[in-house]
Image (spheres, rainbow, N blue to C red):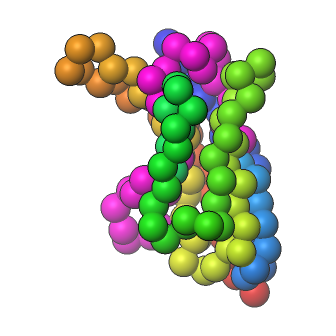
Amino acid sequence: QVQLVESGGGLVQPGGSLRLSCAASRSIFSFDAMGWYRQAPGKERELVAFIQSRGLTNYADSVKGRFAISRDNAKNTVYLQMNSLTPEDTGVYYCNARTIVVFTSTDYWGQGTQVTVSS
């Protein structure tokens, strides 16, 4: 069973920064992609950013230029550096790992970490 453990959330003022971490219980090379999703109160969960096993990255338009996803293969950890935070970035951030076999994908999720942007 895969375990994903997020950390790094908290309360930050608008314009501030946070770095989220997601530690996986096995080699992140075993996943086709890893990413971050978030869910604000009363809203659906949305994709924030992902990084493929080949290193390609993709971001939601709302975070482009402000957030950066990266990974440390030796530590089996994926990071999300969040800069210039706004109240609209508030929500629970979930780490996701995905494996794809033929046309079937399997998703693994962390427990989530709360990010609150407020003055």
Which of the two residues, 8 or 105, is positioned nearer the viewer here? 105
Say left or right for 114 vs 63: right
User: Which residue is drawn at the image coordinates 71% and 22% (left, top)?
Assistant: 73
Q: Is residue 8 above or below residue 75?
A: below
Q: Is residue 119 above or below residue 99?
A: below
Q: Position of residue 102 (x, y in %)?
A: 23, 14
User: Which residue is drawn at the image coordinates 55% and 65% (left, top)?
Assistant: 64
Q: Name the quadrant containing residue 88.
A: bottom right
Say left or right for 60 vs 114: left
Residue at the extreme left: 103
Quadrant location of the C terminus?
Answer: bottom right
Q: Position of residue 36 (x, y in %)?
A: 53, 47
- The answer to whether residue 31 is magenta is yes
Disc tally is 0
Q: Is residue 17 above or below residue 54?
A: below
- The answer to whether residue 75 is magenta is no
Q: Is residue 88 above or below residue 98?
A: below
Instruction: Give the residues drawn in magenta, as a range.
Output: 21-47
Q: Position of residue 75 (x, y in %)?
A: 77, 22
Residue at the extreme bottom: 119
User: Which residue is drawn at the image coordinates 40% and 57% (left, top)?
Assistant: 46
Q: Position of residue 65 (x, y in %)?
A: 62, 67
User: Which residue is drawn at the image coordinates 49% and 32% (left, top)?
Assistant: 52
Whether residue 115 appears in this view of the structure is no
Whether residue 117 appears in this view of the structure is yes
